[in-house]
Image: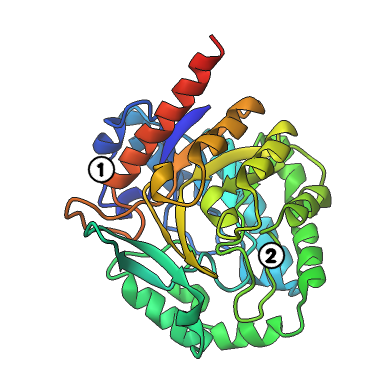
């Protein structure tokens, strides 16, 4: 297991030297904003980021993410061009040492929260979701609200150029159900997985966040059965999961530890995003600290499921509150994520010592 930390490249206010100071943080899961969805990740530009990380003593073996162009998800004739670009991006990042690519196949909206600065009783603030807050909103109003809440920093998966044609895209999705979306997904995977096998990359799909459809648009990666279906689309170790506990766990009927155990045992979890959430009602929750007692998920059971079933991939603390007066990208401050990483390290070390 390798413990890592997400970094946004030169767009990140958190410096690499601070990340390096976090105990047992071996490297980064890099997210860069230089390339739009559908563009080829330029080999030389990306290599500069890798060189920066290496100079700071950090590995770069995971990236998040080479975004899947919406035309691929919708199955438009233009998808073949974008798939060819995707293949070249995979070759380029593999040449720089990348072994895992985290991505998602969520239509239109990437992750979704209704408040990017929900204030908690202790004065910290965090990401939260309340289904009632999107009732009565149009999709465009939701997009506007989310981007305004981000301030001057970008949000992953909420690129303005991708959302500029929102109404056009929503009209197309009226004719796409779960089966059609899954067929488009299969087409994509059948094209790229041979390239992944060739260059030694594992694709790690991120679950739907939250774990249900939004605005009636289909979502196909938020239940155990749906995850099984994804892995069966192309049965290859290169077609794997990024198991995000907060995303899967947003649906109370999902037993996160059991899901982890099932797929870790099959060696189909390439990496994990580990965070805790606190339920406040039906489809209403906020992202708590990582500590089990602050949330609704059993973090010890989650880490034990990974450990007991032979997980040997990459973990990062996922999201964090804004604490100690810090300001920055919503969910991605330094302090609380560093505390989360230390907490996850402690759980893992305890599990290792149980076997001695």
Residue 98 visible? The answer is no
Q: Nearer the viewer, residue 244 or 238?
A: 244
Q: Which residue is mark 2?
A: 81
Q: Residue furthest top?
A: 356
Query: Which quadrant of the structure image shows residue 166?
Result: bottom right
Residue 241 visible? The answer is yes
Q: Residue at x 70, y 73 (%)?
A: 218
For label 1, the crowd category at 10 Å Cα-Cα, with few meaning under 14, some 14 to 19 and many 20 or more, is some
Left or right: 183 in relation to 10:
right
Q: Which residue is mark 1?
A: 15
In percent of width and height, residue 122 lies at: 23, 56
Q: Residue at x 40, y 82 (%)?
A: 144
The answer to whether mark 1 and mark 2 are in CB contact below 8 A is no
Tell me the distance, in whole angstroms, between the alpha carbons under discs 1 and 2: 36 Å
For label 2, the crowd category at 10 Å Cα-Cα, with few meaning under 14, some 14 to 19 and many 20 or more, is few
Q: Residue at x 71, y 39 (%)?
A: 263
Q: Residue furthest left?
A: 325
Left or right: 63 in relation to 17:
right
Instruction: Check disc 2 and report its element: helix, strand or loop.
Output: helix
In percent of width and height, residue 64 lies at: 51, 50
Q: Earlier in the sequence, mark 1 or mark 2?
A: 1
Query: Which quadrant of the structure image shows residue 248?
Result: bottom right
- Give the label on residue 319, or none: none
Left or right: 312 in relation to 122:
right
In percent of width and height, residue 152 lies at: 27, 69
Q: Nearer the viewer, residue 118 or 40?
A: 118
């Amino acid at each position: 297991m390798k413990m890592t930390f997400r970094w946004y490249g030169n767009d990140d206010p958190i410096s690499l030297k601070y990340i390096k100071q976090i105990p047992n943080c071996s490297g980064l899961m890099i997210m860069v904003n230089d390339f739009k969805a559908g563009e080829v990740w330029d080999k030389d530009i990306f290599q500069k980021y890798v060189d920066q990380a290496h100079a700071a003593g950090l590995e770069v073996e995971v990236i998040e993410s080479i975004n899947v162009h919406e035309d691929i998800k919708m199955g438009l004739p233009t998808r073949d061009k974008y798939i060819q670009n995707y293949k070249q991006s995979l070759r380029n990042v593999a040449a720089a040492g990348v072994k895992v690519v985290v991505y998602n196949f969520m239509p239109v909206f990437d992750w979704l929260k209704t408040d990017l600065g929900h204030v908690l009783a202790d004065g910290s603030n965090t990401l939260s979701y309340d289904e009632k807050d999107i009732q009565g909103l149009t999709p465009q109003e939701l997009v506007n609200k989310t981007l305004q809440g981000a301030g001057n920093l970008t949000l992953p998966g909420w690129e303005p150029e991708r959302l500029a044609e929102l109404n056009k895209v929503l009209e197309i999705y009226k004719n796409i159900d779960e089966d059609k979306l899954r067929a488009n997904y299969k087409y994509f995977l059948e094209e790229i997985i041979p390239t992944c096998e060739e260059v030694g990359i594992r694709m790690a799909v991120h679950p739907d966040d939250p774990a249900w459809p939004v605005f009636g648009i289909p979502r196909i990666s938020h239940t155990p059965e749906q995850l099984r279906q994804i892995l069966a689309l192309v049965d290859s170790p290169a077609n794997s999961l990024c198991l995000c506990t907060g995303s899967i766990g947003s649906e109370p009927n999902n037993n996160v530890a059991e899901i982890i155990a099932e797929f870790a045992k099959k060696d189909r979890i390439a990496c994990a995003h580990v965070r805790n959430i606190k339920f406040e009602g039906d489809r209403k929750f906020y992202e708590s600290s990582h500590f089990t007692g602050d949330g609704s998920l059993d973090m010890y059971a989650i880490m034990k499921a990974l450990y007991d079933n032979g997980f040997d991939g990459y973990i990062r603390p996922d999201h964090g509150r804004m604490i100690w007066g810090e300001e920055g990208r919503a969910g991605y401050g330094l302090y609380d994520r560093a505390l989360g990483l230390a907490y996850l390290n402690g759980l893992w070390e305890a599990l290792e010592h149980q076997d001695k």
